[in-house]
Image: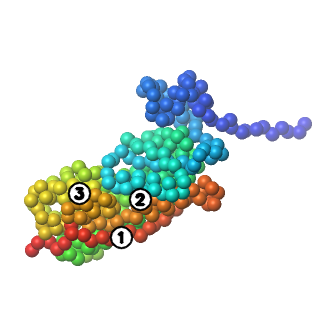
Amino acid sequence: MPSRRLSHARTPVTLQTVAERVGVSTMTVSNVINGRGKVSAETRARVTEAIRATGYVPNVAARRLAGAAGTRLGLLYPDIRSPFLTEVLLAALASANAVGAQLVVREGGLVTVAHAEQLVMQAIEAGAEGLLLVPPYAELLAGSAYFQRLGIPAAAIAGAVPLQGMQTVRIDNRLAADQLTTHLVQAGHTQIAFITGPMDHGDSHERLLGFQQAMARHGLAIAPAHIRTGRFCFQSGCEAAESLLAEPSRPTAILASNDDMALGVLWVAQRAGLRVPQDLSVAAFDDTAASRRAWPPLTVAAQPMGAMADAAVAAIIATLVGKAEMPEGEQVLAHTLLVRTSSGPPRR
């Protein structure tokens, strides 16, 4: 008797599959995914576990064939209020509008893989066909098996290194930090402090390495107390500046890992009666509108936000219209060192 080949085709997992497994409606499952509606903590946990157990992923390919008006791109970003994230949002909106795409924005509240995955599901449920990611969500999703199964085109804006399953569009953070540090050293500073960003961001590591690299090359020691960890927000810049300026060997220059923290340094310095740059030089990264309007205006390594957003959107659109494979690797765009009046020679 001829042998019969058995079919091992797997039945697609749908929203209905998850709902039946938990014993709830598809609306309840959708509400859990999108973080809306009145769902008990116990039901939410059961639905989340069922999504993981069944391997449910939204059908992105079907959405692309559904003929929705205009391509939709999802932007996922953390809930930190900062000038930089405002610049990212505005740049992404402009880039999406330029190619006739719509932007679906999802703001995250937790820095976990599970929360990042939930934000992805929310964006796709809202019609997103590709994703624009901001650290730390880019780094979190690069290590997510769930995200890899989706096969959705994604690009990380202002990341630090190549990430699995997406393209990274960035500047050379290490080189930029090296150049800012060298600028301060050449101005005559030897006691330079550094405020890092959150260390779950790849760019925080790269900027710290660039600072350390430049100090070592110029034969300057870094006092352990002169490196402080910030959170990419104004308040953390204030806290770091207060502790640094209270040190017996007070630094004559502070390099902050973003504009918002540098603005906190300026505020604390001026409240303490210090003149910038005569008593304290300050430099930073990004070149947001706030850095240009500060007094004195900040010396910065400027990130080309418009060009970065354009490149990220172009990579996703090229994939969606079939002109390119899934975006991977990285694009490193040129930054600009802008020397303004917040930095100068130390007072002798």
Name, please, the residue furthest toward the right: 1
Left or right of 202 on screen, residue 8: right
Of callouts 1 and 2, the N-terminal one: 2
- The C terminus: image quadrant: bottom left
Q: Which amino acid does label 3 sit on?
A: Leu
**Residue drawn at the location 52% of the way across and 27% of the way down:** 28
Instruction: Give yes or no for contact between labels 3 and 2 (Cβ–Cβ under 8 Å).
Output: no
Quickly name the residue at label 2: 158
Measure the alpha-carbon separation of dots 1 and 2: 15 Å
| Point 19% across, 59% down: residue | 266
Marks 1 & 2, CB-CB < 8 Å contact: no
Cα distance in 3D space between marks 3 and 2: 20 Å
Q: Residue at x 10, y 57 (%)?
A: 272
Find residue 265 and report its horizontal and vertical position in percent. 20, 57
Task: Measuring from the top left, give residue 191's x and y in whole percent.
Answer: 17, 68
Q: Is residue 184 above or below residue 60?
A: below
Inspect the image, locate mark 2, and give the three-letter code of the amino acid beneath it: Ala
Q: Which residue is drawn at 20% across and 53% down?
A: 238
Horizontal side of 181 relative to 329 (left or right) equals: left
Q: In this view, does 76 lie above or below 341?
A: above
* Res. 166 in view: no
Measuring from the top left, give residue 206's x and y in whole percent. Answer: 36, 62
